Image (tube, coloured by chain):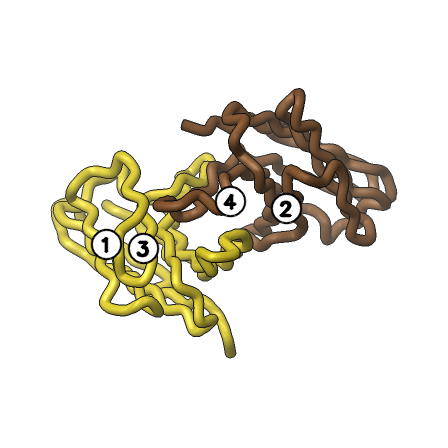
Chain colours: A yellow, B brown
Amino acid sequence: DTAVSQTPKYLVTQMGNDKSIKCEQNLGHDTMYWYKQDSKKFLKIMFSYNNKELIINETVPNRFSPKSPDKAHLNLHINSLELGDSAVYFCASTFRSNGETQYFGPGTRLLVL
Amino acid sequence: GENVEQHPSTLSVQEGDSAVIKCTYSDSASNYFPWYKQELGKRPQLIIDIRSNVGEKKDQRIAVTLNKTAKHFSLHITETQPEDSAVYFCAASIMGLTGGGNKLTFGTGTQLKVEL
């Protein structure tokens, strides 16, 4: 299936741990994003990569480090997890040249205890 | 930066009625305005979008209107059905910005409930 996929779907971990979330898209898009959706459903962009280059970096703690090994993959590593990191993290992708419709992944539900 | 406000935060309508959700944006350079629908536990999915060179766009029961002068845009859903129940997000961005990545700024969402 052509899609944006994320792993894992659920992640429950202790405060202070380090965890990674992976995203892959097989839509041939050249731009990928990470969004955070908090408990109030507010969707906020965190990072964006275009062809492996970081192009958007919002005010995010440096405990969050994205990595894009190629334009089809965008991973998110989080160090020293805190309670406030609990949220749903969505990956999305698009073509930058036409740059409109962003297709979202299914989300990763992160719970920090 | 861009700021998008969305109202109402919750909306309850009877099946068959119309629903209207309104958004305002702050950056006059914004030129692309998508609407996303997010069902419970699912991903946001694009339902309709509009560019700033168009005042209105319609797709079956869904329509979006844009007033560039006033910097607001609205989603209209007619003949609502129970399956329309979801959270709806408006967003704004500047399309074609060199060096940028089409950053979407989302509104705070509207929980629409369609009652039988």
Q: Nearer the viewer, mark 3 or mark 4?
A: 4
Q: Quadrant of residue B71?
A: top right
- On screen, residue A106 above or below B86: below
The reply to whether discs 3 and 1 touch (Cβ–Cβ < 8 Å) is yes
Classify mark 3: helix, strand or loop: strand
At x 46%, y 35%, the residue is: A40
Judging depth in this view, the residue of A15 and B5 nearest the camera is B5
Q: Are marks 3 and 4 on the same chain?
A: no
Q: Which residue is mark 1?
A: A66
Indicate the chain on which mark 1 is placed: A
Classify mark 4: helix, strand or loop: loop
Q: Which residue is mark 4?
A: B95
Measure the C-alpha gap from mark 1 to mark 2. Answer: 30 Å
Q: Which residue is mark 3?
A: A49
Q: Position of residue A58 (x, y in %)?
A: 30, 38
Residue type beneath disc 1: Pro
- On screen, residue A17 above or below B2: below
Comes first in the chain, label 4 or label 2: 2
Q: Quadrant of residue A29?
A: bottom left
